[in-house]
Image (cartoon, rainbow, N blue to C red):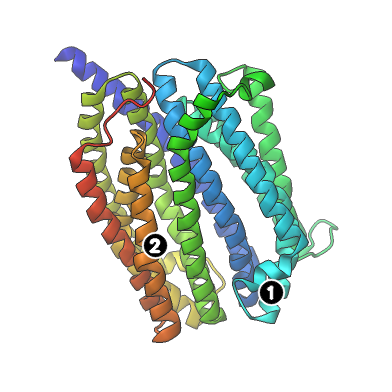
Amino acid sequence: MASLSSYDKRFYKKTIAIAVPVALQALLNNFLNVIDTVMIGSLGEESLAAVGLANKVFFVLSLVLFGVAGGSTVLTAQYWGKKDIPNVRRVLGLSLCIGVSAALIFTVCSAAFPKSVMRIFTPDGSTISLGAGYLALVAFSYPFQAISQCYTYFYRAVNKVAFTVVITASAIAVNAFINYTLIFGKFGFPQMGLRGAAVGTLVARIYECAAILIYVYATKGAGAAKLRELLHFDKAFIRQFFKIATPVIFNESVWGLGVTMYALVYGRMGVVPMAAITATQVVEEMFVAAFAGLGSATGVVLGNEMGANRLEDAKRHSKVLLLSNVVFSSSLAVLLILLRKQILSLFDLSAEVFSAAAMCLFIFACYLPFKTHNYVNIVGILRSGGDTKYTLFLDFSGVWAIGVPMAVLGGLIVKQPIYIVYAMVLFEEIYKAFLGLLRYRKGKWIKNIVG
């Protein structure tokens, strides 16, 4: 029993060692979003709405990248538990090939046809013009972000995440400084408005990518592979990769397309609802960041255990992780309800936008325990054992059978206020939490998928 207790302590210590840096990294990124929103919000509600819609393009790409990196993490974590370094590096190489290829497609479309892309989200001519100028520049940051994300997720799976937090923090500082300088024309530079924000993002993403690659190869860690090691695939390996990763990639893509449909509806409800939901989602992302960290850590540590054939340990530890989420998320929901107006006061919002955003945040807080449960259970536990087809079913049906119909019904047909539409859309989280818990209890996710 003493030995088991010692092992449990190491397990939870490793979970915290991954979850805290991942959560901190997400919080730092979202803190930058808050700073950007405050700066851009000072340019007016149309500018805020334009950037919110333009960034939906990267949101869709980021979900494709998350699908690639997430599917790769499942295999990397189990191979790492098995101490199979050659296959760990092959997974990284294949994820880089897919991720960068997807990013280049998004870059070409967004840079060459920015107004056409913006018209997908809104019919408002002024918003299209403002957003297109921003999008045409920021699109060139996508391939650099793809490389950074593939390496970041790879190092999470091999339990080394601290250095990525340091690099992210420094990249955020670079981004914030350039944004302030170019948006407002400080220190003798021209006042570029939204285009200045795009330049700041581009420079920061290039810096972040370069810093990660320099660190990886200078320290000669698991990711410091030669090109032939990254690209040494055979048909059997590629089949195994896509068997696990394809449902995750498709999952995130169709979910992202569904969430983009929400943005399409919000954009057609008017500038005020779009500005309110943009501010709401910036705050929402900050509160969810901690659970994204817990979800990522859950997938990695349980994957490591199952790759090492510790299946009963994985089952037992998953219960503790789910219970921890309930306690933590409920406490955070109460905190958000109490502080939501103080948080929104950081933004330069009109009284109408402020009131709508405050109601949206109240709605979000009520759904928070369900949403975070889905992060830990679906993204973490179920995927850790390769149960990716069922998680695809959950996200696909949740968005397209509940979320999108609710958005269209509430926003475009019966024309409810934005906070009512938001509440209708978020009902998908309860649906996924219920079915996801039933799947968890069946235990089909508990398996070693790398032999």
> Is residue 392 visible to the viewer in this orientation of the structure?
yes
Farthest residue to the left: give it: 1
Q: Which mark is residue 399?
A: 2
Q: Residue at x 56, y 23 (%)?
A: 234
SS for callout 2: helix
Horizontal and vertical percent position of residue 256: 49, 57
Nearest to viewer (mark 1 / mark 2): 2
Pick the residue in front: 169 or 220: 220
Image side of residue 97 versus residue 249, left or right:
right
Pick the residue in front: 135 or 294: 135
> Is residue 350 visible to the viewer in this orientation of the structure?
no
Which residue matches tag 1? Answer: 128
Horizontal and vertical percent position of residue 224: 62, 20
Q: Amino acid at mark 2?
A: Val
Q: Amino acid at mark 1?
A: Ile
Pick the residue in front: 436 or 396: 396
SS for callout 1: helix
Of label 1 and label 2, which has the lower sequence position?
1
Q: Quadrant of residue 17?
A: top left
Q: Which mark is residue 364?
A: none
The C terminus lies in quadrant? top left
Image side of residue 397 versus residue 202, left or right:
left
Count the numbered circles shown.
2
Horizontal and vertical percent position of residue 131: 69, 69
Q: CA distance from mark 1 to mark 2?
A: 26 Å
